[in-house]
């Protein structure tokens, strides 16, 4: 593994102080993290990628990491506009783009509705399919919620613990943890299904997915490959929603192979 310099940067975009990390030298590679994440979430991936001929640029999206919250209720489109303003301010004329989970929705909006044209595009367990699906965990959560409401008073100390467990089981713990404004943003984000934008992707695309992802199931990744013409998929066996953390070596090797084609 090669040595590299990790830098913490700050820039003001439309009145919001945006913090972002940069690491490595070479072709610019912009990474958009998922809901509840930050640039710090990508440290293992940075360790694998930064010395391989790429300059990684990873912002803390507004409301996450060190970057302050938006001043109003944003949806995916507003986040996309903000990142585009960031790209222009740092004069990023050509780059590779990766979006994970919520960041995948932002990336999809950017390249299909906002006329942003990265050299190549990577989706990692991207959250864009928003149709209502009750998986096993969510069904368990509903049962617990109904049962808990009957046997536990909302005023009791036990209820808060019980509620926390229910959110974790259902896969909606990000909502549970958010402050009031970010909860409204979360609701706006998850109310917009972006599946119809997939066929509009017109650049080489790598789709990376955790085989056992319980938040955005692997079937979503297969849908991506079916809908995007110039695409290939890499399923990370045994991985869940964050393969860039748990399987950083395999993920980085797949990305390097794709980008160097």
Image: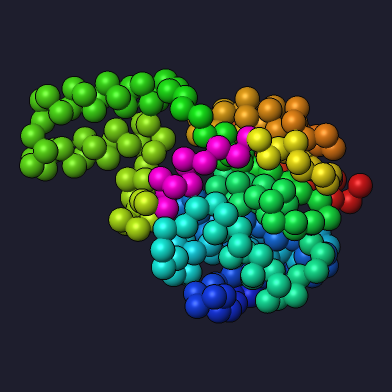
Q: Which SS does the magenta portion mostly show?
A: helix
Residue 227 part of the magenta-drawn span: no
Region rendered in magenta: 185-195
The foreground one among 174 and 4 is 174
Name the spot of residue 2 as percent of width and height, x first.
77, 64
**Is residue 82 visible in this depiction of the protein?**
yes
Q: Is residue 83 left or right of residue 167?
A: right
Q: In x, y percent, where is residue 118?
A: 79, 56
Residue 182: horizontal and vertical position, in percent? 38, 56
Q: Is residue 146 above or below residue 52?
A: above
Q: Splitting the image into 4 quarters, where does residue 210 fall? A: top right
- Indicate left or right for 157 with 19 as reference: left
Establish if 252 lies above or below 220.
Answer: below
Which of these two is toward me, 145 or 16? 16
- Magenta-span inclusion, residue 187: yes
In the depicted view, which residue is nearer to us: 14 or 36?
14
Residue in the image at 8% along x and 42% along y = 155
Rendered residue at 82%/64% (across/down): 94
**Residue 54 in view of the camera:** no
Residue 9: quarter of image: bottom right
Q: Residue at x 44, y 47 (%)?
A: 188
Looking at the picture, does residue 176 appear above or below residue 69?
Answer: above
Residue 42 location, quadrant: bottom right
The residue sitting at 24% across, 37% down in the picture is 163
């Amino acid at each position: 593994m090669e040595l590299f310099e990790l830098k913490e940067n700050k820039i003001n975009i439309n009145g919001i102080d945006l913090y972002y990390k940069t690491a490595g030298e070479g072709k610019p590679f912009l990474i958009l993290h998922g809901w509840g994440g930050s640039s710090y979430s990508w440290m293992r991936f940075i360790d694998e990628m930064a010395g391989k001929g790429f300059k990684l640029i990873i912002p803390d999206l507004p409301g996450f990491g060190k970057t302050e919250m938006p001043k109003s209720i944003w949806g995916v489109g507003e986040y996309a506009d903000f990142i585009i303003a960031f790209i222009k301010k740092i004069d990023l004329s050509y780059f590779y783009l990766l979006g994970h989970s919520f960041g995948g929705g932002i990336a999809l909006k950017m390249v299909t509705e906002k006329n942003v044209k990265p050299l190549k595009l990577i989706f990692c367990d991207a959250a864009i399919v928003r149709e209502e699906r009750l998986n096993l965990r969510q069904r368990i959560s509903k049962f617990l919620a109904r049962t808990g409401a009957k046997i536990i008073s909302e005023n009791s100390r036990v209820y808060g613990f019980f509620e926390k467990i229910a959110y974790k089981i259902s896969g909606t713990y990000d909502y549970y943890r958010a402050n009031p404004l970010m909860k409204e943003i979360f609701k706006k984000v998850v109310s917009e299904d972006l599946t119809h934008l997939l066929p509009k992707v017109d650049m080489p695309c790598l789709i990376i997915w955790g085989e056992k992802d319980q938040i955005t199931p692997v079937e979503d990744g297969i849908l991506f490959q079916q809908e995007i013409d110039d695409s290939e998929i890499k399923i990370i066996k045994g991985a869940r929603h964050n393969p860039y953390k748990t399987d950083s070596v395999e993920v980085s090797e797949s990305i390097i192979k794709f980008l160097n084609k």
